Amino acid sequence: MDLEKIREKLLEKRNQILKSLEESAKSDINEKTGVGDDADTVTDELSRETHYKLTQADRETLYLIDLALRKIDSGTYGICEECGAVIGEKRLEAIPWVRLCIDCSQNEEIVRQFQQRNEEEMIYNIIPPALGEEEESKNLQAE
C-alpha cells in the first residue's frame, strides 16, 4: 500500500471540503434577507437545514481525514480501531479515512439502528394512552 499516494488523496479531499465549507460560509453571509411569503420561508428553512446537515457531514469527514493523516504519521493507518485487524486495501482505496474493517463497520451499523429504534420507541412510549385504552389495559390485567 502506497501511503504517500493515500496521503495525497486525503489532503486533496481535505482541501475540497475546506473550500466547500468556506464557500458555504460566504453564501450564508450573502444570503438574501427580506420579506417573502410562507412558501419562501419554508423553502429557505429547508435549504438551511439541508445545508447544515451537509456541512456537518463535511466536518465529520474532515475530522476523520485528520485522524487518518495522524495514523499515517504514527504507523497505525489501516488498522481497525475496534478489533485491531488490518483493513482491506480496496476498502482503504475507496474510503481512505475509514476507521473500521467491514465486519466492525457492519456491527456498528446494526447497533446504531437498534439504538435509533429504541430511542423512537421511548419517544412514543411517553405519549399517554388514548382515552379508553387505559381502562382496556386494566381490564386485561384483571382477567
Image (cartoon, grey):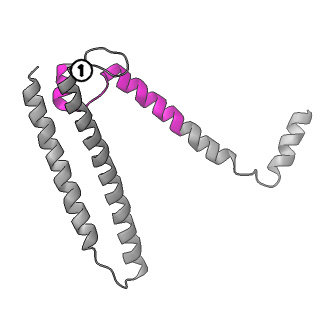
Q: Residue furthest top?
A: 85
Instruction: Measuring from the top left, give residue 71's x and y in whole percent.
Output: 23, 26
Name the residue at 92% across, 35% down.
142
Structural crowding at the residue carrying mark 1, measured as other residues with C-alpha within 10 Å and reported as few (<14), some (14–19) or many (≥20): some
Locate residue 66 relative to residue 118 in the image: left or right. Answer: left
Residue of label 1: 76
Give whichever of 41, 129 is nearer the camera: 41
Q: Quick check: is 139 in the magenta stretch?
A: no
Check disc 1 and give the amino acid type: Thr
Name the residue at 28% across, 36% down.
64
Name the residue at 40% across, 82% down.
37
Q: Which residue lies furthest to the right in this view?
A: 142
Locate residue 97 relative to residue 46 in the image: left or right. Answer: left
Q: Residue furthest front?
A: 74
Name the residue at 19% across, 61% down.
23
Give whichever of 73, 142 is nearer the camera: 73
Instruction: Measuring from the top left, give residue 133's x and y in whole percent.
Output: 80, 48
Can see residue 96? no
Locate residue 63 relative to residue 16 in the image: left or right. Answer: right
Please state the extent of the stretch shown in magenta in the rendering.
Answer: 89-116
Q: Is the magenta stretch mostly helix, strand or loop?
A: helix
Can see residue 123? yes
